[in-house]
Amino acid sequence: MSARAPLPRWADVALLPVLNVVLAFLIGGLIVLAVGQNPLQAVGVMLYGAFGYGAGVGYTLYYTTDFIFAGLAVALAYHAGMFNIGGEGQAYIGGLGVILVALALNGLHWALMFPLMILFGALFGAFWAYIPGVLQAKRGSHIVITTILFNFIATSVMSYIITRILKPEGVNSDESAPIEAISRIPRLGEFFSYFGRSPANLSVLVAVLALVLCYWLIWHSKFGYAMRALGQNPTAARYAGISGTRMIIITMALCGALAGMVAVNNVGGVQGRLILNFVNGAGFVGIAVAFMGRGHPIGVALSALLFGALYQGGQELAFSMPGITKEMIVTIQALVILFTGAMGDMLRIPLMRLFDRRATAGGQ
Amino acid sequence: MMQYYTDLILILDSTVRLAVPLLLACLAGLYSERSGIVDIGLEGKLLGSAFGAATVAAVTGSAWLGLLAGIGVALCFSAVHGLASINLKGDQTISGVALNFLAAGLTTFLGQSWFHRGGMTPQLGNGERFTPITLPFAPQLADVPIIGGLYSELISGHNIITYFAFIAVPLTAFILFKTRFGLRLRAVGENPKALDTAGMSVTRLRYQALVITAILVGIGGTYLSVAQSSGFNNNMSAGRGYIALAALIFAKWRPWPALLVCLLFGFLDALQFRLQGIDFPLIGQVPVQAIQVLPYLLTIILLAGFIGRAVAPKASGQPYTKER
């Protein structure tokens, strides 16, 4: 067996991931076809729902904001060699920080409240990721298992806090008191009427900022270098004098802080109150987003946009094609994780063969 | 006094009922993890097979065909997991997570497309389910003090899957520690290279482990929808696959402790229903959430090494690459 030349860089960075995503969508399409629906018509409806009109675009942006934060929370940990499944719980606990500061200073102008909500959302989210980080770094408990368990603990803790402590008297639904309108993060629709009454708000700018910061952190800072060294070869990193313990704990806390931003978008902006289970799976979508985007902020942004469009388009689908429920989106999400994450190298060998053949044919 | 005894029997009875799916999933995970394949996907397999079993039982009217379908679904999931993590040497955790989402999405989507009941499958009649079996003399002995209640309430009156789950424990212990296959299974999870050098196929052994995993978890999923309930509900596994995984760690990957831990977690679950609305002196009502959270907290404390140390099979999570 002769050694094959590695794939050209563009094929490795762009072609392979795109092929994997296409494969995931093809299988999704086959499933839709199998229940007797037209997948192309579904794609059309979803595209219109996601990008066809202002409010639709606004909703897409709102989902995209959530998924960027959740995706970065997974991607950052992955660079350090960890799999953070706890974004869901970290975002949920982040919501507690956001609502506590918002209710304590209720009525404060949003320009002052916004940074405070970011700070407290980040702190609370970071705390919820810090504990699994410490347990991994100091006691060797596997981060995957602990973050899963912490998701469940967050669910119980928050359901107690919301239903027993934060819920005001005389309110039937399980939610906290509302944040006053002046303290809430303004919707984009207030500045640009194009977005209508859609939930997209200024948090989307925070998401863009987070992308840039993460890009700088991962590839242009000493910390990022240490993080990647740890992720690729822990032994070598140790010989280079990098403290794995410290790196793991700080990286996890940063991931938690990023996940906490999901709460800023929802609690501080869209809902203006803390609602039971407000995260609603966004933390898990982050896993698909991170793998699909290969952990690169540009990739994360693009795949967050794709999933944002899928989620918004999926809502639209529920109205116009009742045969397809929005759970189809979860299925697509699963297929994307499977093909870009777990089976990411399935097409690598066939591709290498193809490029080899072309190279030899060209040489003759 | 008698009242407390009856209460205790009732709590223990529901403990057994709640522990069965955990136990089956936990033993399933034991085979896979002992062979070196981490199986986060237990949750999805449980959910998928619950759906498959309920669907086929509803369509054919046979609980046994439902059971076959449940196992079949779990086998398909295992096949994908094996392909990703054994052949393609992908990340086992990611593959497991993907399978969990796949099950969550597909069961609701297909359920809605096929039955139009918001993701639920049609209600199963008694003939289409695994119904309680009355053991010999249970009704006659019911009035005998102490052992009567114990025998006719706690031991008798469960369905066939429950009895199977409890038999599966000694069976697993025997297979794992007394047979040649068990020895190889444990070895492949600790040191696959040694087995490879001895001329055995690591791939083959790991696939065999995944097949046993699928059969057990398939039976567990069937229990949820065709024995415990009469039909499939959205997300009816409700995190049991993850609790089973926690139980497996808690039991340090051994069958008998797995039984004890699953019973303990089942007991906490049963207690949570019993304690609702009961006032205790001094502490008042115990919040449901405090009991819900206990299995997770206990597992984390164990994982952190504060009560003994849980050491996973050495090669778990690592794909095996044969040297060339």
Image (tube, coloured by chain):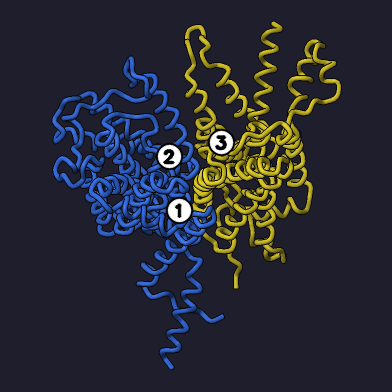
**Residue plotted at (69% across, 22% down):** B13
For the point 31% across and 51% down, which residue is it?
A: A50
Which residue lies at the image location 70% right of the left edge and 12% below the top edge?
B6
Q: Secondary structure at mark 2?
A: helix
Question: What is the three-letter code of the residue carrying label 3?
Answer: Asn
Q: Colour of chain A?
A: blue
Q: Give the residue type at disc 2.
A: Pro
What residue would you read off at disc 2?
A132
At mark 3, the secondary structure is loop
The residue that label 3 is drawn on is: B233
Q: Chain of mark 3?
A: B
Please tell me how crowded label 3 is: few (under 14), some (14-19), or many (20+) other residues with Cα within 10 Å: many
**Circle 1 residue:** A332
Disc 2 to disc 3, C-alpha distance? 32 Å
Tell me: B79 left or right of B200: left
Q: Is residue B65 left or right of residue B247?
A: right
Image coordinates of residue A330 in percent, x first then y, are 45, 48
- Picture layout, residue A24 above or below residue B220: below
Q: Is residue A266 visible?
A: yes
- What color is chain B drawn in? yellow
- Using the numbered discs, state the Cα–Cα distance from disc 3 to disc 1 in whole angstroms: 21 Å
Quadrant of the image occupied by residue A359: bottom left
- Please name whichever residue, A320 or B197, is drawn nearer the observer in this view of the structure: A320
Q: Secondary structure at mark 1?
A: helix
Q: At x 27% / y 39%, what residue is drawn?
A: A265
Q: Earlier in the sequence, mark 1 or mark 2?
A: 2
